Image: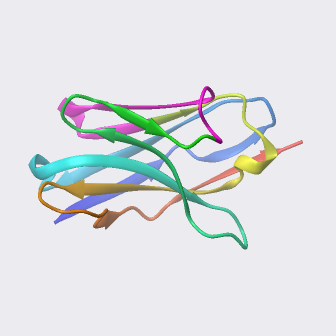
Amino acid sequence: QVQLVESGGGLVQAGGSLRLSCAATGRTGSTYAMAWFRQAPGKEREFVAQIRWSGGSTVYADSVKGRFTISRDNAKNTMYLQLNTLKLEDTAVYYCAAQQLGTSRYGYWGQGTQVTVSS
């Protein structure tokens, strides 16, 4: 089992920045990748960014490329998402997720943290 806890969300003006954190506990030694997803009101959950736990390769959704940066600290079992140049459409609940070795999906999810961008 892996437990994920997000933090760092809040209210920010358009153009501003936030940094989200996702702390993982439990069987973190079997982590293959971690990712951020988000869900805006009335919309489906969408992929934001992914990072491989070993090697650190990253993938981003087109909508956040050049503005968001995903990173991780293996020693702390923590993943981050730096959100810069925030737009109104970035408002959503942001979730972190973990994919374990030998699996093909994200099997563990955090409870989410709200990011609200105001004009």
Looking at the rendering, in which quadrant would you find the C terminus?
Answer: top right
Q: Quadrant of residue 56?
A: top left
- Describe residue 95's horizontal placement relative to residue 101 as left or right: right
Residue 22 shown in magenta:
no
Looking at the rendering, in which quadrant would you find the N terminus?
Answer: bottom left
Q: Residue at x 32, y 48 (%)?
A: 34
Q: Residue at x 78, y 29 (%)?
A: 15
Number of numbered markers = 0
- Describe residue 101's horizontal placement relative to residue 57 as left or right: left
Q: Which residues are magenta?
A: 63-80
Residue 77 shown in magenta:
yes
Front residue of 83 and 6: 83
Colour pattern of the rendering = rainbow
Q: Is residue 39 above or below residue 89?
A: below
- Percent x, y of residue 93: 60, 59
- Describe residue 22's horizontal placement relative to residue 102 as left or right: right
- Percent x, y of residue 109: 36, 64
- Percent x, y of residue 28: 15, 50
Q: Is residue 82 above or below residue 9?
A: above
Q: Is residue 81 above or below residue 94?
A: above
- Percent x, y of residue 39: 61, 63
- Describe residue 50's horizontal placement relative to residue 87 as left or right: left
Kindly give the residue lying farthest to the bottom in the view shown: 42
Q: Residue at x 27, y 39 (%)?
A: 52
Q: Quadrant of residue 106?
A: bottom left
Q: Residue at x 18, y 63 (%)?
A: 103
